Structures are given as structure tokens and as C-alpha cells.
């Protein structure tokens, strides 16, 4: 699979200076973590689950979470498990490519139970999402994952969700983060990414952001995100990929003023571009939050609606300017440091302070590609909505 792989070769050639690379479920964890992109959640109870998964793959989705936790009623868990087993068996019998698939469980015991009940179809599973992750709950989850991997012979990753009240509350946050860090460090090779449960954070205070507000406008939430990245997202080799929070809105709403698309990393939009790109979706708040995610050290995003996937992926493509800067900074002859004017002659590139940014940018370029110099966000968005070639 690859990002924008649902587009025709001619369309990709038109859009990309460097096309996204292909990867598989067996690729190195570092590549998979960067490539998760917009991770689409789906209730595990959907009656046409396998068909839905293949449909999303054909439209550009590369990672999905099949949820047995908050998205379904307590009384539906057994039904959801049986549905998963049936549809994983259906996927295993087809040659069609599908996204990286993760199951969000409720309790540690479900991990080994589901992995073994899947039988040969476990080969279609990439791992498990671990809800309300703390040290106490996390150790049991990760030990269960280790046992499942041993029992099935299948490489299985964990994606812990950081959403507990202990992490939100100021008086317990520092200790909780330290304990979480200690736990995931012990199982580092199994932890693909850490996910943020912002909806649960807001719930603890009876809050809900509007379509015009990002998670960063809710100060309680923004402070948690900052502390999580501070402790768990460092670029010194000790950090993890931390993914962006869910965006809850997906229906077009009647609004008093015409929505304004915030400035993208690629180009300023013209009025006709604005009309074309927003004709179906009210996504200006989502776009702003995606840019703020990256500015605050987050990679990828949790998504609950297919319409969110393409904007996340389009804004993940590295611009030609970013790519030029990153390559200049990482040239071997620059190893001793120094400062230079960018090739675009609009900024200073300082080798040592910008090195970690450049390395992260080139990894993103590998999995999402580099746009041609004249190609902007609107072109990527509109091309991605077109039919596959």
C-alpha cells in the first residue's frame, strides 16, 4: 500500500516531485508509525465490515481501528467479537489490499482471546488499541499483547490511548506521565504510536469544542497535549509518535458567514478554489487543527468519518519548499553546523537546531511524498476526491 495509491499513475506524476513510497504491514515500525496518517475508526459491529474496509482502502485509507469499546453498547461486545472473527476470515480469503487493521479492546483478556480465535486470519491484524492507558492498566494490556504475539507468531503492535482523568488533572499528571513513560519504555518495540483521547479529556469538565474551535483553543486540553509531547514525544531517540486528536464534526452546517480556509503550508487559496474544496464539507476548523497538530509535535490523526481522511493526508504531503530546506540542512558537508539562507531565500536554516525537524520532515516525505513546486493543498485535495485510475 501507499498514500495516494488510489490515484492513477498519471495523476500522481502530475502532483508529486517525489511520490510516496510503498509499504506493507511488515515494514519497519518507524515507517508504519509515520505512515498511519488518518486512522479511521469503525464500530466492530458493522454488518458489512469486510466490504467497508476494502471500500475505504480503495479511497485512500491506510489504517483503521475496529472498535469494541466506546463506539458500541456494553451489551454488543460479544456480537462485535463474533462479527470481527467472521469478517477477518472473509478478508483472509481475498487477495485485495486492505489498510493496517487494529482492534480496540476493552480489557486485556480480550487480546489473547481474539488473537487465538482469529486463527490464520490473525495475519490480517496489525495490533491492538489500548484504551484509558495508565501504568496499572497498561502493564496488563502489554503483557497480554506479548502473550498473543507468542501464541500466534504474528507481529502485533500496541497503540495506547492516553485519556484517563489522572492524566488530565494537574495534581496527578506529572506522576501519571512518568509512570506511563516507564511502562511503554519497557515494551518500546511493541508500541507503534500513542493516541490522545481528547473527547474523554473534555468530558471530565463537561466541555465540547465547536466546529470553529480546535483542541488547542480549549486550554485544559492544550496543556495536556503539551505535557504529553514534552515527556513522550521528544526527538532525542526516547520519544514516540503521538497522534492528533479526533475531529468530531462532519456534517455541512448552515453558517452566517462563509467559511474561510486557513492558510495551508502550500499556498493561499483563491475564491474559486475555496468554493470547490468546501462545497461538500465544512472543514476549515479541521484544517486549522491539523496544522496545529504538526506545529505541536503530533503526527497523523484519529478520524471518525471518511471525509476527514483526505484533508489529513493532503496536509501531510511535504511541500517542495519544506523538502528543499530539510535536504539542505542534512547535507553531509553541513555536519559541523552553521547557518544558511534557504534556497527559497525567505528564511534562515540553522543546521544544528533544525536537524531534528529536517529528519522528521524527510521521513514524512518518504511516506506521504513531496508535492511539485506548483502544486498546493487544493490540487491534492481535489485530485484525491476524483476516481481512481
Image: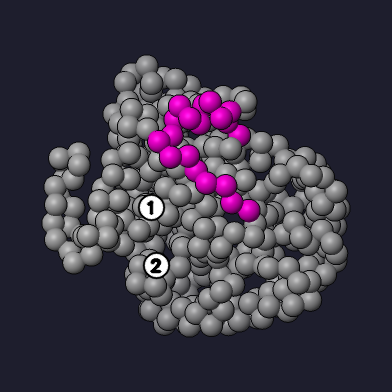
Quarter of the image that includes the C terminus = top right
Tag nearer the camera, 2 or 1: 1
Earlier in the chain: of badge 2 and badge 1, it is 2
Residue 327: percent from left, percent from top: 30, 51
Residue 97: percent from left, percent from top: 71, 44
Nearest to the observer: residue 382 or residue 139: 382
Q: In the rendered image, which residue does mark 2 sit on?
A: 233
Neighbour class for label 1 at 10 Å: few (<14), some, many (≥20)? many
Seen at 45% across and 49% down, the residue is 366
Seen at 43% across and 51% down, the residue is 364
Nearest to the observer: residue 170 or residue 330: 330
Seen at 17% across and 64% down, the residue is 337
Image height of 145 relative to 83, above or below? below
> Is residue 382 covered in magenta?
no
CA gap, disc 2 and disc 1: 17 Å
Nearest to the observer: residue 80 or residue 202: 80
Q: Indicate the quadrant where residue 267 lies.
A: top left
Quarter of the image that includes the N terminus = top right
Q: From the viewer's perspective, tell me whether residue 137 is left or right of residue 260.
A: right
Residue 356: percent from left, percent from top: 31, 62
Q: From the viewer's perspective, tell me whether residue 292 is left or right of residue 36.
A: left
Image height of 20 relative to 296, above or below? above
Q: Which mark is residue 362?
A: 1
Seen at 57% across and 47% down, the residue is 22
Query: Is residue 225 in sight in this rendering?
Result: yes
Q: Which mark is residue 348?
A: none
Which residues fall within the magenta stretch?
6-24
Residue 288: percent from left, percent from top: 36, 41
> Is residue 16 covered in magenta?
yes
Neighbour class for label 2 at 10 Å: few (<14), some, many (≥20)? many
Secondary structure at badge 2 equals loop
Amino acid at each position: 500500500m501507499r498514500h495516494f495509491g488510489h490515484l492513477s499513475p498519471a495523476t500522481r506524476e502530475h502532483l508529486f516531485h517525489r511520490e510516496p513510497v510503498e509499504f506493507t504491514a511488515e515494514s519497519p515500525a518507524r515507517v508504519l508509525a509515520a505512515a498511519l496518517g488518518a486512522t479511521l475508526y469503525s464500530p466492530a459491529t458493522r454488518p458489512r465490515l469486510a466490504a467497508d474496509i476494502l471500500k475505504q482502502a480503495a479511497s485512500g485509507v491506510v489504517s483503521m481501528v475496529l472498535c469494541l469499546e466506546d463506539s458500541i453498547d456494553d451489551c454488543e461486545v460479544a456480537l462485535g467479537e463474533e462479527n470481527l472473527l467472521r469478517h477477518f476470515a472473509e478478508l483472509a480469503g481475498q487477495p485485495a489490499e486492505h489498510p493496517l487493521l487494529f482492534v480496540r479492546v476493552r480489557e486485556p483478556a480480550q487480546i489473547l482471546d481474539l488473537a487465538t480465535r482469529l486463527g490464520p486470519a490473525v495475519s490480517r491484524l496489525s495490533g491492538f488499541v489500548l484504551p484509558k492507558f495508565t501504568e496499572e492498566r497498561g502493564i496488563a494490556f502489554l503483557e497480554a499483547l506479548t502473550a498473543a504475539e507468542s501464541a500466534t507468531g504474528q507481529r502485533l503492535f500496541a497503540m495506547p490511548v492516553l485519556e484517563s482523568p489522572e492524566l488530565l488533572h494537574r495534581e496527578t499528571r506529572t506522576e501519571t506521565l512518568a509512570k506511563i513513560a516507564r511502562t511503554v519504555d519497557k515494551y518500546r518495540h511493541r508500541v507503534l504510536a500513542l493516541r490522545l483521547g481528547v473527547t474523554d479529556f473534555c468530558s471530565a469538565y463537561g466541555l465540547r469544542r465547536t466546529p470553529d474551535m480546535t483542541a488547542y483553543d480549549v486550554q485544559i486540553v492544550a496543556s495536556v497535549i503539551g505535557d504529553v509531547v514534552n515527556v513522550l514525544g521528544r526527538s532525542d531517540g526516547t520519544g514516540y509518535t503521538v497522534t492528533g486528536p479526533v475531529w468530531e464534526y462532519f456534517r455541512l452546517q448552515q453558517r452566517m458567514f462563509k467559511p474561510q480556509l486557513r492558510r495551508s503550508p502550500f499556498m493561499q487559496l483563491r475564491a474559486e478554489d475555496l468554493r470547490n474544496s468546501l462545497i461538500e464539507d465544512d472543514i476549515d476548523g479541521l484544517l486549522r487543527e491539523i496544522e496545529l497538530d504538526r506545529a505541536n509535535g503530533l503526527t497523523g490523526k484519529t478520524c471518525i468519518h471518511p471525509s476527514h481522511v483526505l484533508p489529513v493526508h493532503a496536509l501531510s504531503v511535504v511541500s517542495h519548499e519544506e523538502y528543499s530546506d530539510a535536504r539542505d540542512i542534512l547535507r553531509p558537508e553541513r555536519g559541523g553546523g552553521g547557518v544558511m539562507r534557504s534556497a527559497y531565500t525567505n528564511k534562515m536554516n540553522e543546521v544544528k537546531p533544525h536537524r531534528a525537524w529536517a529528519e522528521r520532515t524527510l521521513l514524512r516525505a518518504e511516506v506521504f511524498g513531496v508535492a511539485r513546486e506548483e502544486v498546493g493543498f487544493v490540487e491534492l485535495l481535489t485530485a484525491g476526491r476524483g476516481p481512481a485510475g
